[in-house]
Image (spheres, rainbow, N blue to C red):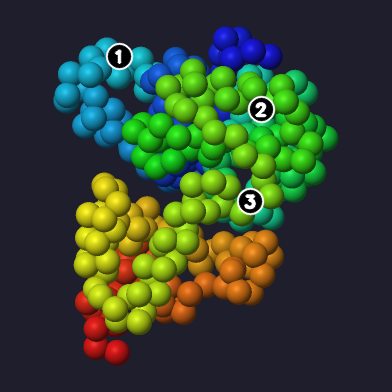
Amino acid sequence: MKVEDIRKVAVIGAGSMGSQIVEVLSRVAGYEAHMVDLNEEVLSQGMRGIDERLERHFVSKDRMSAEEKKATMGRIKCGTSIAGAVKDADFVMEAVVENLGVKKEIFGSLHESAPPHVVLASNTSALNITEMGAATGRPDKVVGMHFFNPVAVMALVEVVRGAHTSDETVDFTCELARHLGKEPVVCRDVSYGFLANRVYGRMTGEAVQMVWERVAPPAEIDRAVKLGYGLPMGPLELADMVASWGLSASSEEDRMRELGPDGGRLHPLVRAMVRAGYTGGRGKKGIYDFYSDVLSRW
């Protein structure tokens, strides 16, 4: 299979990342893109999000005509059946919750239903590709393809090689990333968090610790980082925006297994925030609000 032969793709998971990936696959590459989720409400939300983003970022700015938007939406199909979506797909992407057990179960299903030659990719931001591949009978065709949020804007795609991932699979995935207008970088899956998140996670962890120590409020810490290093957003406001706190809590078990208790345990501030409902994400409170609502008076 070559990238130019792709006609139909399937994305498992219709959440924030899955729906954004589907949008790019349809809009940029013109693929027939099947978006799968067991929750029909999540599917509906995913489609609404795609429609709103196309209207706000493309049609309203004369970067896309109404007819082009209609064609992009028309190439996207929704369903709740993994087997039905992948049985004749040319490429399959998994983009579900960051839980290795769940991902391994899905990869087993993908192997059973997808054509034998098809590459099975994961959008995981940290978890082990080798273990996902071991859940299939085609570990040579299992690869990480980690997009960054927002998918339409961010150029980076981390292509992650498992122990048995073939050179052909890595080359194919890099070429697909370039075909989507992205810039691939390749790494091995022995690095928890791969490349960008491994580095950035350290900075976020130090920022959280400084809030915990009352060195400065979150806004001041972010301001210092932005001004000092020329970043468009600080680590704390970015984590608030993309719901990193809730994700950190839900992935603690996998992180502890990979990094041990010292590197994997959830920070007590993040644990307190999540328990109180300050998970971050669209329309939800995060560390900024937790600092003003709770921490400043503790």
Graded by Cα atoms within 10 Å as few (under 14), some (14 to 19) or many (20 or more), the crowding at tag 1 reads some
- Where residue 252 sits, quadrant-wise, is bottom right
Q: Is residue 30 left or right of residue 63?
A: right
Q: Nearer the viewer, mark 1 or mark 3?
A: 3
* Residue 166: image location, x then y, percent: 75, 28
Graded by Cα atoms within 10 Å as few (under 14), some (14 to 19) or many (20 or more), the crowding at tag 2 reads many
- Which residue was labeled with disc 3? 191
Q: How many marks?
A: 3
Tag 2 near tag 1, CB within 8 Å: no
- Which residue was labeled with disc 2? 170
- Which residue was labeled with disc 1? 68
Front-most of 74 and 8?
8
**Amino acid type assigned to the residue bearing label 3 in the image:** Ser
- Vertical arrangement, residue 80 with respect to residue 257, above or below: above
Graded by Cα atoms within 10 Å as few (under 14), some (14 to 19) or many (20 or more), the crowding at tag 3 reads some
* Residue 15: image location, x then y, percent: 45, 44
Tag 1 near tag 3, CB within 8 Å: no
- Decide which of tag 2 and tag 1 comes sooner along the chain: 1
- Vertical arrangement, residue 214 with respect to residue 251, above or below: below
